[in-house]
Amino acid sequence: MTCLNLVSPASSRYHQLGGVASLLPLPISSRSFCIRESSAVVLSRSLSTSSPSGARRDDNSARVFRRRLSVTSASMAGLPPKPTVLVTGAGGRTGSIVYKKLKERSDQFTAKGLVRTPESKDKIGGAEDVYVGDIRDADSIAPAIQGVDALIILTSAVPKMKPGFDPSKGERPEFYYEEGCFPEQVDWIGQKNQIDAAKAAGVKHVVLVGSMGGTNLSNPLNSLGNGNILVCSSISISDFHDHAFVVLLAGGLQDKGGIRELLVGKDDELLQTETRTIARPDVAEVCLQALQYEESKFKAFDLASKPEGTGTPTTDFKALFSQITTRF
């Protein structure tokens, strides 16, 4: 049993997590992984607007303009005009929002979801485009990833509170992870299985959502259930060249979205400010927008927002992604 060297792509180059590999003995071969940036495949069309009639020429020009508008955002990211997008963790609080947004924008995306249980599938509508699979089992998720153009990863281990907690006695809650659902199994091996399956299926664009805090091994989240969840979330990315990869590390999650100015950063610098939270709907929106702009590709960034009522709600996502300087 060997350890996988751990690097996280959210620093000026990567998070510096020296010595962490010894914490996580994994049953996989030790390798060094990296991403090499490649040229994006840009969708282009040759559209003729010539017409013997002035009126017909104007009409053709209008149709061409509409057609170009319909493919502009997709072509920016090198995806088909209407890409098929799979969101894993679609039964979760943030993943379900992403899935709903994809369904609402059926003119832009073909939605697919992956959940862990039939109950989770029923919770988000039970549609045929929702697959049941276990990310810890690479074979079980392969059917969902077939035919996918883009993958949004929103899976993570979830700690549970131990029973018997009594806040009236001044006690601190204790947490645990269910057997087989530790961060090492879900956030590390489970994410690796998804990335490897995406690579094998020819998926061209991956958005991986994690949490800020990975630069600090003493972060309290790592102590929950002794799971080292932020360490495990800082997954190495296995040789995903010729594919666009985006790593989004969110701040503390809230519920009310679409009303705040969004902020991007690196190296957990936003955790040192008063602007270290982000609404789940805003995370979901950034996931979808990241599929549409070249400016997001091969980048890792922290994401937070200004307090409600300050700043201007973000609508220009191209400008937001252009602020990010951390590239793979």
Image (spheres, rainbow, N blue to C red):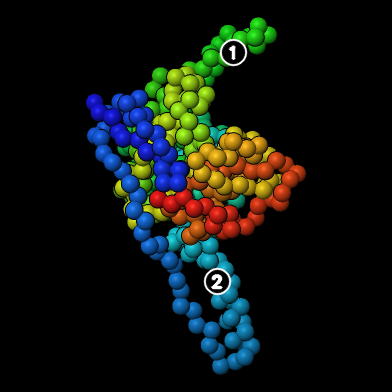
For the point 49% across and 63% down, which residue is it?
76
Disc 2 residue type (three-letter)? Arg
Q: Residues within 10 Å of mark 2 (few under 14, many from 20)?
A: some
Nearer the observer, 56 or 153: 153
Residue that carries the numbered disc 1 in the rendered image: 172
Spatial distance from mark 1 to mark 2, Cα to Cα? 58 Å
Quadrant of residue 100 within the rendered picture: top right
- The residue under the point 52% across, 24% down is 220
Q: Which mark is residue 67?
A: 2
Q: Is residue 181 visible?
A: no
| Outermost residue to the top | 169
Left or right: residue 262 compared with residue 74: right
Q: Which structural element holds mark 2?
A: helix
Check the image and report above or below for 278 versus 221.
below
In terms of sequence position, does the residue under pointer 1 or pointer 2 come before the other? Answer: 2
Work out whether residue 113 or residue 72 is closer to the camera in this orientation and state it.
72
